Image: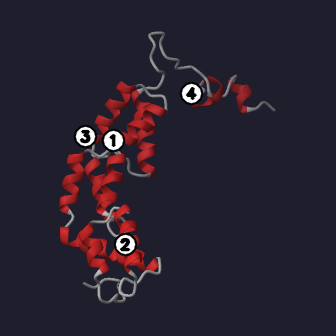
Amino acid sequence: MRSKKDAQGASSSDIYMSPQRGHDHDAPAASGESGKSGKDCLRKAGMLLAQRDYTCMRLREKLLAGGFDPETVEETLESLREARYLDDRRYAYNYVQLHREDRSRLRIRTDLENRGVPDDVIGEVMREESEEHSTQAEVRQILKLMRKRGFDPSSAAWEERRKMQAYLYRKGYAASSVRSAMNADLLDSDGFSV
C-alpha cells in the first residue's frame, strides 16, 4: 500500500520549508537586505509585548539585538505607538502605581529613567501622583523598614538614629518623610501615625 506522500510525490513539508527551520526559500536579495522583514519585526514585537509591557527604548534594544535593522525597528515602533500597543506614559503610570508602596519617589524616578522613559513623561506621571499620598506612602515604607530592621525611634540612641537616617537617605527617601517617621510617637497596626 502506498503512503499519501508516495501518491503525491512529495509532502507539503518537502515543498515549503519555513525560514525558522533554517531553509532559505525566501533568501534576501543581493542588495544587502537583512533578511528579516517588517512583518517579522512586528511579529517579534507582538510576542514580546504579549509577555509584558516595554518602554520604547527597551523594545528597540530587544529588536535590534534580535538582528533587525534600525530602520525596520523604528518603523515597527512607530506602528506600535500609533496603535497604542507601546506607550511610555502608560508604562510609567503603571510602574508608579505598582511601586508607590514599596519604593521611594527618587527610586521610582531613577528606575523609569534607566528604562528609557523621557523626563517630561516621568515628571507628568509623578505630578499626577498625589503629593500627600506619596508622603504618607513614604512614611509607611520607612516605618516598615525600621520595624523590619528592629529599630524603634523612641528608644534608639542618637548614633543609632543617625545610622538609620543615613540608611534611609541612601534608599532615596525624602528628608521630610524620614523626619516624620523618626518623630512618630506610636506605631499603630498599620505602621503609620503622625
Q: Amino acid under label 3?
A: Glu
Residue pointed to by mark 3: 82
Residue 26 in the image: above or below residue 140: above
Q: Is residue 183 something that shows in the picture?
A: yes
Nearest the viewer among 92 and 148 is 148
Q: Disc 4 and disc 1: Cα gap in Å?
A: 28 Å
Q: Amino acid under label 4?
A: Pro
* Residue located 34% across and 33% down the image: 76
Residue 22: quadrant of the picture: top right
Residue 78 in the image: x percent, y percent? 28, 35
> How packed is label 2: few (under 14 Cα within 10 Å), some, or many (20 or more)?
few
Residue 177 in the image: above or below residue 31: below
Q: Identify the disc placed on residue 162.
A: 2
Residue pointed to by mark 1: 56
Q: Disc 3 and disc 4: Cα gap in Å?
A: 29 Å
> How packed is label 4: few (under 14 Cα within 10 Å), some, or many (20 or more)?
few
Q: Nearer the viewer, mark 4 or mark 2?
A: 2
* Residue located 26% across and 44% down the image: 118
Residue 45 in the image: above or below residue 29: below
